[in-house]
Amino acid sequence: MRVTAVDHSESKPEMHAMRRSGGWLVAFLLASCTHSEPFGSGNIPANGPPGTGSPLRLTLNPGQNRDPAWLRDQSGIQYSFQQAADPDLDYCLGVLPPAGGTRLAEKCYPGDPSGQSTDALTNPAPGPGGRLAWVEAHSPVGSLSPITRTIRTGSLAVTDSGQVAITLPYVASSGQLHGTAIDLAWIGSDTLVYVGAEALIGSVCNGCKKDTLVTGRDIVLLDLKDPTHTPNVVPGTTSASSVWPSADGTAIYYTLGGDTKVYRRSLALGAVSVVADLDTLGITRDVSVQDSVLLAVAGGLVSYNVNPVFDRLQGDSGGVLIRLDLRAGGPVALGDTFHYYRRPRLSPDRRFVVTEGTDRKTGLQIATLWLITLP
């Protein structure tokens, strides 16, 4: 395996085949989610972690548990969770204790007490000074397409509906349609970075079960001080699959669809370098970096092709979690052999990783959150 590193002082992969038979039926998709009553934030009694060991399962919720992110002081793990028992299918935001246990805080959309719409708060991005960014979408119950989707900034308080940073979808300067956003993060106190993506729903044949695909289009910088809130596409990031800002905010790390490399781009100079190439492990994505420690997901249930109708498409249901020291040493697989992982995030003290996990054996795509202790 070839591994390339830079100085920072500045098993056979299983594949999802995406075949065309009768054509793909496509619409914007709002991720399924559920909700019973609007919750307040904080002051929820915390029980201890649901077990011991590593990997340690953090969530027992039977619905989806996604988008983990560490609070900046490592006092908790923020994520989006599905309340799976209710027909309106909402997503809420929650905060777990750093070692697991009962949610410390919850934030659901408070404007639909009768459950007439599907309301989803996803992709939480903790920011400086307690600020929060998230993606919010609303649609009639049972609809495949949201009526509205926005990126918002505000706080975790349930009464804070936030300020609209940008309304989705829009056509970016690259000519690509951005219907949603993934890997939302802050650069400093006034800029958001994310992967502008399309959320597609389709079936491989007439009568076949419909499936979803969120596929990246471009990396975007959004200056919140700019009164026009114009999405600025980062050059050379077509088909981006993940992005992560450097700690000092001067650069971004990113991956591209169908590629095994991790790139670093200086935001001021535009200089691009390859910091790692996991070529023998398969398609690489879900990058995050702290100091010299790089986390990524490689191989697993992933596929990439160029579709004549919908351009570049990457389907991803998780892969092998990889840790790499950019200064020395080769890649090390984390976690266990029973799960595929997505969206790993290293704790600020670099001792723990929180990540989504799905069952590798059954192929069930219900995501749970897992905590991995690093040696």
Image: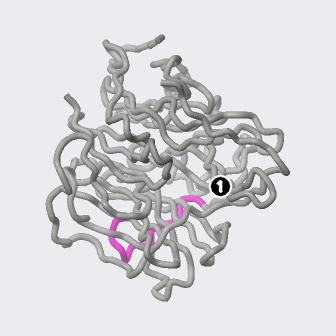
* Residue placed under numbered mark 1 in the picture: 211
Relative placement, left or right, of 99 versus 182 is left
Residue at coordinates 42% horizontally, 52% vertically from top-left? 67
Q: What stretch is highlighted in magenta?
A: 155-166
Relative placement, left or right, of 41 versus 258 is left
Label 1 CA crowd tier, 10 Å (few <14, some 14–19, many 20+): few
Quadrant position of residue 270: top right
- At numbered mark 1, what does the secondary structure look like: helix, strand or loop? strand
Image position, residue 316 (x, y; %): 56, 41
Residue at coordinates 32% horizontally, 13% vertically from top-left? 329
Quadrant position of residue 326: top left
Task: Between residue 234 and residue 336, name the one nearer to us.
Answer: 336
Type of amino acid under label 1: Asp
Task: Between residue 188 and residue 66, name the one nearer to us.
Answer: 66
**Does the magenta portion include 295?**
no
**Does the magenta portion include 164?**
yes
What type of secondary structure mainly makes up the magenta span?
loop
Residue at coordinates 49% horizontally, 62% vertically from top-left? 152
Q: In this view, does 174 lie above or below 253?
A: below
Q: Is residue 191 visible?
A: no
Q: Can residue 122 be seen in this view?
A: yes
Relative placement, left or right, of 204 versus 239 is right
Q: In this view, does 308 lie above or below 78?
A: above
Q: In which quarter of the image is the C terminus?
A: top left
- Total marks placed: 1
Residue at coordinates 38% horizontally, 28% vertically from top-left? 322
